[in-house]
C-alpha cells in the first residue's frame, strides 16, 4: 500500500520516520506491506537446509571463478541491472 508522506497524519508520519530512521520529505512516498513469516518447525528447517545448500553452491562457484580484478564483475552486474531497470544508476 502506497502512502504520500504529505498526506500522512502527523502521528503516523512520526512512527514511519522512527522506523526508517530519518525525517521524510513531503514529496516522498512510503510503501507499507505486511509479510507473513514462516512458521517454525519443519518448514523453517527445510528453508534453512535449502539456504545452506545455496551457500555451499555459491561458495563452490566462487572458488571456480575468482572475482575479476579490473572491476568487470561490477560492470557486468550494473549492465544486468540497467537491462531490467532502465535508468538504474549504481550507488557509489
Image (spheres, rainbow, N blue to C red):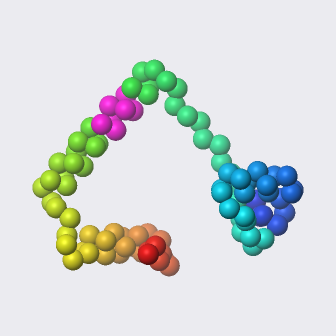
What residue sits 32% from the left and 31% below the top? 49
- Left/right placement of residue 26 relative to residue 36 reads right
Residue sitting at the far left: 64
Q: Is residue 53 visible?
A: yes
Magenta stretch: dominant secondary structure: helix
* Quadrant assignment for the C terminus: bottom left
Q: Residue at x 79, y 55 (%)?
A: 14
Q: Quadrant of residue 3?
A: bottom right
Apparent side of residue 4 relative to residue 78 in the rendered image (left or right): right
Q: Position of residue 61 (x, y in %)?
A: 18, 53
Q: Residue at x 78, y 71 (%)?
A: 26
Magenta residues, as a range? 46-52
Identify the image quadrant of residue 13: bottom right
Residue 1 visible in image: no
**Position above or below: 86 against 21:** below
Q: x and y percent of residue 39 in the render?
A: 52, 26
- Vertical arrangement, residue 51 with respect to residue 86, above or below: above
Compared with 80, 51 (above or below) is above
Q: Is residue 56 left or right of residue 39?
A: left
x 74%, y 70%: residue: 25
Q: Position of residue 34 (x, y in %)?
A: 65, 43
Q: Position of residue 65 (x, y in %)?
A: 15, 60
The mark total stands at 0
Is residue 26 one of those drawn in magenta? no
- Single out the residue that lies furthest toward the top: 41
Amino acid at each position: 500500500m502506497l502512502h504520500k508522506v504529505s498526506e500522512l497524519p502527523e502521528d503516523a508520519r512520526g512512527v514511519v520516520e522512527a522506523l526508517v530512521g530519518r525525517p521524510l520529505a513531503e514529496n516522498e512516498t512510503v510503501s507499507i506491506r505486511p509479510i507473513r513469516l514462516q512458521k517454525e518447525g519443519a518448514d523453517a528447517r527445510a528453508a534453512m537446509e535449502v539456504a545452506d545448500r545455496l551457500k555451499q553452491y555459491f561458495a563452490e562457484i566462487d572458488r571456480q571463478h575468482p572475482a575479476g580484478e579490473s572491476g568487470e564483475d561490477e560492470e557486468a552486474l550494473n549492465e544486468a541491472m540497467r537491462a531490467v531497470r532502465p535508468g538504474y544508476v549504481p550507488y557509489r
